[in-house]
Image (tube, grey):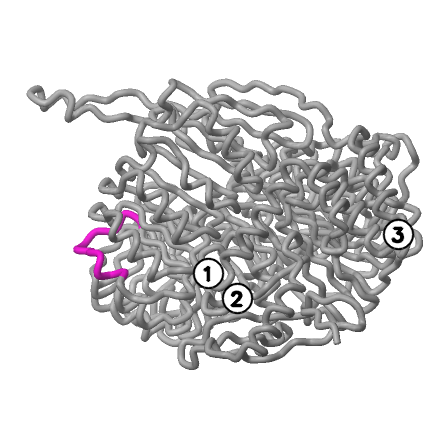
Amino acid sequence: MRLKMQQMHLGMENDTNQIEFADVSKSSQKMRDRDTRSFDPTPDRDDDDEDLDWSTSSGSQTCIPSPSIHEGDGNNDYYGGGDDDVMVNVTIPISASFETLTIFSICFEQVRLSLLPLWFAAGKRRDCYFSKLADESCNGILNLVKDPFATLRCILRDSEFQNLRIRLTEFMERVDLSGCPQIASAFLQLALCSYSTEPLLPQIVEQSLIELQHLDGDKYPISRCLAQKLSFEAVHVVDISKWSGVQFEAAIELFCNLFPSLRTLKASYCLNFRMTTLYHLVQKCHLVDEVDLTVDVSPVIPMQVTTISENIESCRDLSGSSYKMLRDELSFSSITKLTLKGRSDINDMDLQRISSLFASLSYLNIKGCTSVTDVGISKLICKCMELHSLLVSDTRFGRNSILSLCSSFPSDGFPGVHCKQKNSTSLAFRLQKLNIGGCKSVDETSLLQLLSDTYLLKSLCMRGTVLADDALFNFLGSSLERLDVSDTMVSGASLVHIIRRNPGLRFFKAKGCRNLCHGGSRHEEGKFTSEVLSYNGCSSGEDMYFELGRKCMLEEAAFGWGFSPFSLKYLGPAIKSLRAIAVGLGASFGHHELTLLPDTCPMLESVILYFQVISDVIVKSIVESLKHLKVLVLCYCLGDLSSLSFHFSMPNLRKLRLERVTPWMKNADLVILTQSCPNLIELSLSGCKNLNSESQKIISNGWPGLISIHLEECGEVTVSGVSSLFDCKAIENLLLRHNGCGIRRNFIIDAASKMPMLRILALDLCDANEGGFDSPSCADRFSLSIIKIARCKQWRCPFNLQNLDDCRRPLHKETIILEWNSKELRTSLVKERA
């Protein structure tokens, strides 16, 4: 009987000393989290993101993903083949017999190494049981990325192209191919051909590959004749996120035939997926109602940075996109949910076309779309009558857009709501989710009008706006579940008003609100906009925490100014189920309260502390007691912290940031950290001046599966250049600044080729040993979308005249930012340190 592994869950059981093969269907959601993960460059999650899923698989378990497939109701993942496959569900002790180990080997041989996500294969290189297979998988993936045609022809000659077959059956509902940079158009050609029974197929395909190597884009015929003979009607979701080498128009033609019932397409971080490709998709796949085209948000946000100069250079169309569909008459689409987060290549004309084609659009995310204007957004709002979720943070959203939202529209088909609200026919009244964080074009009068007209909101983010108490007091909604008013002028009085009306709040963020330190926000000296009398003897700021504790059950919270040890006591039962807490500047957590934090909030999975006084006792209490801790961030904290804080096992920790809190850290301490936190995927160290070039090897050997590395002012880590860090093959975000002047001129091009998933790279000219860096061409950048190069000037202290060399240190001057999108390369020079 031939054994083929459909699902496999591999993990070391510490108490039984066994390797377990179990059904992954018990933890299907965990697999989806790991397969679709991506690095968020911001330390805190924005409220425009979807709800946090806290079911990420723990480090003590290891799932084997191939391009993942979901069967039946869509809740069970499996990685199997046809109907003749047999589910393997056995437990094998390390001291197993030869026969048992033989079964183990047979099962594992069915894992198609060239189909594994790169991040997974790279992470398993540390595992003593699977390091050899992981190396084989990584090498095969990288060969496919660098020279797909030559590698695929070799596979054909060896008659092994069945190993590239993407396992599909008639019952599969979800196909997840994300995180696989090795999948290019030629790869899809071969994977599809593997379903054919044609005896001369290898020779035919090899000749086809030779011919197709010289063709582009819409001329690329991905086995349409074979695709027409195959159909998987149960597939509703396809995820192709982080693909970089595919002609998407041709891929869409393939999906149209293979998956006739396709409803959702996720293509995050695919710069070559242009708006013309989206129009092509809706022409070919008429049932698609959800599309996600997220890319990294530009660091050059209008009105948030000072741009000194800017240059735009058009990129040659490498994708071979066809513009024929723009000349044809486009029919209306059934798309209801569209995510274009970070797409700087879309403009007002694109918004106009979207509003014309997607009449049923109910959810739109254009966060960070820096090329759209307030007028363009307002025109879209007037045409999309079904909108109930609008995410426009970090755009030019302003007065015109608010006027459009608050204008009256026909309410045909909209269920009646009994409310004293005057303008119940406006789009603002119907909104359930609104994110305008960072929109500096919005004035106080417009905000007052907007919040006066909203009633059904469940999620509201207004961080970094001119929001004040008057606007919040005019909000009459009672359905809020998420609220972010960080970095605004609100006070405790207006927040008490909101909390009392919205007992269902689960996510609450109020960092950077200086007016929480006193009773109200002031428009004139000595005058408060409003006053709310406290009936529990507290200031209005403390009354806010009292109301939260009395009314709400929080899952995520962020506090800043006005937060004190008494606040924690007032919160009481509201934070018993808290899973994430962030404490920022202005908050005062007492030593006793921080020590008892794990007892107060036993469900915590994310702890972020800025500018707090910490100690070994506090950190020990956090890492020992919070067994499910996944995120630990300690930034600019004071206190006596030593290496003893990290001598405790943290197997579930996925993200660690230690900034200006561990200046004593040496290579030996870094080794201990790799042993204590073996499953990190994001690492950020700053101010560790005792590290040297050997630290690179410690990091790459200890955490080969990292997707993000930030090292700043860490001694002499790069004084001899960058070498060992290249062994972290799956890096997506890399920052190296002020770690030693040893980085070579061609480093950027090397990093892009050796780390094919690298999207964001940040450097400093102080570390360039040849005076600068070569920028890559469009063809050589692979997945790179953003490069940030800081430039410093020398600053000298005027008070120490005896040791001039010692008191000289670099001071930031400006940042050069290179950004690629599907149309152009934009080079900006900004004053800020990006």
| The N terminus, quarter of image | bottom right
Give the number of the disc on residue 62: 2
Q: Image quadrant of residue 6?
A: bottom right
Q: Residue at x 36, y 45 (%)?
A: 697
Q: Which sits in the foreground, 389 or 752?
A: 752
Q: Of the residues under marks 2 and 1, which one precedes in the sequence?
A: 2
Which mark is in front, 3 or 1? 1
Residue 257: assigned label:
3
Q: Would residue 736 appear left or right of 227 to someone viewing this image? A: left
- Rendered location of residue 586, percent (x, y): 29, 51
Q: In the rendered structure, are the residues bearing label 2 and label 1 in contact, judged by CB atoms less than 8 Å apart?
A: yes
The Cα atoms of the two marked residues, 3 and 2, are separated by: 35 Å
Is residue 505 visible from the viewing direction of this image? no
Q: Disc 1 designates what residue?
A: 127
Tally the numbered discs: 3
- Is residue 644 a member of the stretch shown in magenta? yes
Q: Please tell me how crowded label 3 is: few (under 14), some (14-19), or many (20+) other residues with Cα within 10 Å.
A: many
Q: Nearer the viewer, mark 2 or mark 1?
A: 1
Say which amino acid is labelled 2.
Thr
- The x, y position of residue 64, in whole percent, is 59, 63
Q: Residues within 10 Å of mark 1 (few under 14, many from 20)?
A: few
User: In the image, which residues are magenta?
Assistant: 635-646
Q: Is residue 566 magenta?
A: no
Q: Position of residue 231 (x, y in %)?
A: 88, 59
